Amino acid sequence: MKRLLAIIMTLCMIFGLSSVGVWATDAWTSMTPMLSARVLFQTAVVDEKIYAIGGRDSGTGPVLTMEVYDPSNNTWTWKASMLTSRREFQAVVLNGKIYVIGGNGGGTLNRVEEYDPTTNTWTTKADMSTARENFQAEVIDGKIYVIGGNGNRGNSFATLSSVEVYDPTTNTWTTKASMSTGREFFQTTVLDGKIYAIGGSGASSSTSIASAEVYDPTANTWTVLASMSNARMNLKTVILDGKIYAIGGYNFGLGHLNSLEMYDPATNTWTTKASMSTPRYAHQAVTVNGQIYAFGGASTSGLTNTAEKYDSSTNTWATIASISEAKYFLESAVVGNDIYALGGSNVYSTGRNTVDKYATDTAPSSITSLTATINNDSVSLAWPSVTGATCYNVKRATSLDGAYTTISTGMTNTTYTDSSITSGTTYYYNVTAVNSAGESGFRITAVVYF
C-alpha cells in the first residue's frame, strides 16, 4: 500500500504542472485614496507605513492633519494632527520618530514638532534660529541638518544660504557654515557622510542655478564643485552606484528639461546622459532595484501623467505605464520594492488625494519539488525555499483537473501538515510561492490515503 502511494506521488511529480515566475505587470494600480487631498505636503515611512503630513488641501490654506497608509491592507487612518498648520516644509525620520520642520503656515515658520508613532502624539521642539520654507533637510549621525530655502515668502527672493543642525538629545539648534550660494527649489542628497546641494533658484528674479557644493559635517565646511551643464530648479536627484543623478527640472532660459546629468564624486565631473522622453519639473524620481523611475510633473504641453525608467548599464530610458492622472508637486514613497505616487495638484494649489502603486518586483519562480509523507491521520508536505518569495500558499483538490481550495495562506516556513483528510480519498496538493508582485505557478503531487 505504501509502495503504491510512492508510485502515484512520483508520477504526479513528473507529469505535474510547472511554471516559472513572471515579470511584474507594467501598470500603476490605483490604491485607496488619501482621506484628504494634499499638495505641497510631505511623506515619511516608518515601519513600512506611509505617513502623509500637512500641505494644502482643496482649499486655500495650509492644513495640520496627518494620516497613515498601511500597504498590507490598503487602508488610510487618521492620526493626531500637528500643532501647527504648514506646507512647503520638510519631514525627516530619526530614531523611529517623525520631525516636521519650518514651512509656511500663513507666514514663514521656524517651528519644529516631533511625532511619536507609538503614542500617536506630537511634541513641540526648539525653534530653528531662522524661519524657512522650500528648504532641504538631511539626517547624518543622529542629527538633522536644514539647508537654504526662503526666509520670507512676502519677499519672493529672500533666498537663504544658511545652515543649522538639530541635536535631538539636547533639543538644541546650532548654526553651521553657510553655503556659498543662496538656494531654494533645489535638491540635497547624502553620499558617504556628506551633503550635496545641487541646483535650485537664486536670489534674483528668473534665475536658475547650475552650481553644486558639498558640506563636510566633520570639518563644518562647504566646497564648491563642478557645475551642471544646465541650470535647473524643481529638479530631482537620486543616488545610484555611488553617483548622483540630476533629473529634469526647469531652466528659465530653456524651459522644461528632459536632460539627465550624472555626477561622479571621485572625479568631480558631471556627465550628460540619455534624456528622458518627456521634459518634466516638480515631478518625482526614486531608485528601486538599480533603476531610476521618474513620473508626473509639469511638462511643455501642461501637466503629465507619464512615467519612465532609466537603466544606467545601457544608458537608456524606457517608457512605462502612466500614473492615474496628470499632476505636479506630488509626493512619492518606496515600501519594499513598491513605488507609491501620492497626492499633488492638477491645478495650481488644488490638492489631489489619489494614490497609485507600481510594483517593480517579479513574481517568484515555482517551487522545484514537493514531497508528501503519509502519517496515521495526516499528510505532511515539504518543499525547498524559493528565492524572492515572502510566503507560500498551500492548495488542495480531490481530482487532478478539479478546483483547488486554498487551505493555508501566508506561510513563511516550507512545511505544512494537513490533518483534515478522509480515509479512502485521493488528494492533489500544490504549493505556490508569493511576493508583492504576485504568485508563482506550481507543481502537483497526488496522495492516496487508505
Image: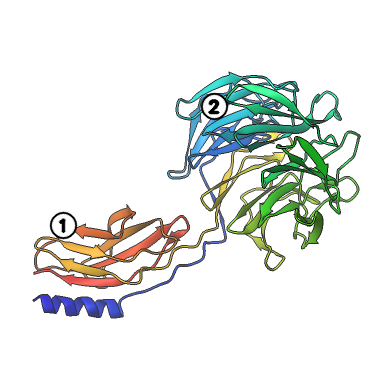
- Residue 422 drawn at (x, y percent): 11, 62
Q: Which three-letter amino acid code belongs to the residue tagged 2?
A: Tyr
Q: Which residue is mark 1?
A: 419
Picture coordinates of residue 430 (x, y %)? 29, 66
As drawn, 369 above or below 156: below
Find the residue positioned furthest to the front. Answer: 219
The residue under the point 60% across, 22% down is 170
Front residue (pair 24, 265): 265
User: For numbered disc 1, what is the local secondary structure?
Assistant: loop
Specify the amino acid type for callout 1.
Answer: Ser
Q: Is residue 6 visible?
A: yes
In the rendered structure, the answer to whether residue 298 lies left or right of residue 37 reads right
- Up-down relation of residue 20 to residue 188 (above or below): below
Residue at 34% in and 58% down: 392
**Mark 2, secondary structure of its residue:** strand
CA separation in Å, label 1 and label 2: 48 Å
Q: Nearer the viewer, residue 420 or 375?
A: 375
